[in-house]
Amino acid sequence: MANLRLVLLGAPGTGKGTQAARLAKRYDLKPIASGDALRAKIESGNELGRQVEEFVSAGRLVPDEIVTTIMLEAINGLPATQGFLLDGFPRTPAQADALAAGLAGDGRRVDAVLSFEMPSDEIIERLTSRRICSGCKKIYNLRFCPPRQDGVCDVCGEQLMQRMDDHADVVATRLQTYLDLTHPLIEHYLDRGILHRINAAATPDEVEAELAGIIEGLERA
Ligand code: G5P
Ligand code: MG
């Protein structure tokens, strides 16, 4: 199980990060999140970070070459037998092609793409009430999974914060960007016979159970 190569595909707020943390632990997979990698670049404060911030804060996609370089570097830094979960990458057909080419060089390929699907109105509600721990990055939701103490992480005690792109106006741009540029990947991976649709509008435990059924089916296949 630990050598599976999975892609989590879905609109903003559909629960990719929440499930990546659960699946990584359950199946010993390395989670690699493009959004987290890009936010780390922003925090570094250098010229690349400033360029990236302009796109992320506006809810637009960072150019393909920048994201692809960062993600392929992270993937290639893993031992060849270590499975991984890509959260938020690829997000355009050009990124999907670059990923396939990068893996093919070592005789590898994506085993499955898990497509998180749910209605847009619920997505907006989830994102505007999301909070993230500034220390360990654990994901909370003021409505669905609040911390025990207001504003404080249950795990590490650091302060919770709101992401710069979780304000309602930026969320609307992110959703539209998803529909215009990323949604076509569903067709792309359906054509390749590796897309699995997930009902993301359930509880985290129910979504995890659905994902586990698919992942364990892959191993038996
Ligand atoms: P990110 O960081 O990749 P998005 O927009 O893809 O951001 P996001 O917002 O991180 O995705 P998510 O990870 O799908 O959403 O969702 P989550 O954080 O786990 O859950 C959202 C909320 O719902 C939380 O409050 C959680 O508690 C709650 N929740 C989760 N699961 C459930 C559930 O099952 N039930 C219920 N009721 N609640 C739940 O990308 C950010 C930006 O980086 C750039 C772009 O600018 C992008 O906008 N970027 C890229 N640019 C170009 N190419 C790429 N490949 C890029 N990747 C990132
Ligand atoms: Mg996320």
Image: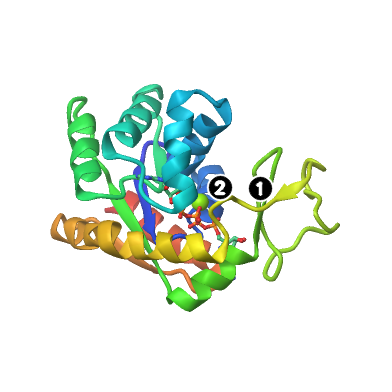
What is the number of the mark on residue 33? none
Q: Secondary structure at mark 1?
A: loop
Could you tell me which residue is drawn at 27 percent across and 62 percent down?
180
Q: Could you tell me which quadrant the N terminus lies in?
A: top left
Callout 2, which amino acid? Ala
Distance from disc 1 to disc 2, alpha carbons, whole Å, reads 9 Å
Q: Secondary structure at mark 2?
A: helix
The residue indicated by pointer 1 is 138
Is the residue indicated by label 1 positioned so its CB lies within 8 Å of ligand 1? no
Q: In this rendering, which labeled residue sits more in front, label 1 or label 2?
A: 1
Q: Are marks 1 and 2 in contact (CB under 8 Å)?
A: yes
Callout 1, which amino acid? Lys
Out of 72 and 215, give the one closest to the viewer. 72
Total tally of numbered discs in the picture: 2
Query: Which label's residue is closer to the chain start, 1 or 2?
Result: 2
What is the number of the mark on residue 21? 2
